[in-house]
Amino acid sequence: MHELLKVAFRLFEILFFLTIGFLLTESVLKNIYDSFGIKLIGNVWVNWFGVSYILFALYVIVVGQLLKKDYVLYNLRLSSSLFWVLFIASIFTVLIPFVKGEHPF
């Protein structure tokens, strides 16, 4: 039963950050891109997942620092090189339209 609660919590985390990331992409990021003359069209899901992963990574960093030794999962995430590569890639996907002047995805 304890493992089932852990799995349910992880599923809730995933769905929560995907939902918040979608809302931020459609309301905030779209307006920011529009103010710079960049149309958010095409594969918008790339930006959506980028924003969602940035939020998730910031959550893991903050919670991992607050609960350093209490939860092994956060320490494993923070020590994972894949976690940091995906974090950098998600920042890149959100910022690259400003560099190129258009939405390349």
Image (spheres, rainbow, N blue to C red):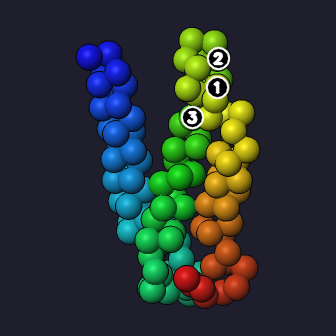
Q: Do the residues labelled 1 and 2 touch (CB within 8 Å)?
A: yes
Q: Residues within 10 Å of mark 3 (few under 14, many from 20)?
A: some
Q: Residue at x 63, y 12 (%)?
A: 69
State which tag comes first along the sequence, 1 or 2: 2
In the picture, the disc for residue 60 is: 3
Task: Report the residue at 60% width, 67% height from top.
Answer: 94
Q: Is residue 66 placed above or below 31 in the rendered structure?
A: above
Q: Which residue position holds label 1?
A: 75
Is mark 1 in CB contact (under 8 Å) with mark 3?
no
Q: Residue 68's mark?
A: 2
Location of the N terminus by quadrant is top left
Between marks 1 and 3 in the image, the one whose residue lies nearer the viewer: 1
Label 3 secondary element: helix
Query: Residue 92 lies in what quarter of the image?
Result: bottom right
Where does residue 76 sit, x and y in percent of width and height?
64, 29
- Between 51 and 30, the one lying in front of the other is 51
x, y percentage for residue 33?
54, 77
Q: Which amino acid does label 1 sit on?
A: Asn
| Residue at figure coordinates x 35%, y 21% from the top left | 3
Residue at the extreme left: 1
Q: Quadrant of the C terminus?
A: bottom right
Say whether residue 65 is visible.
Answer: yes
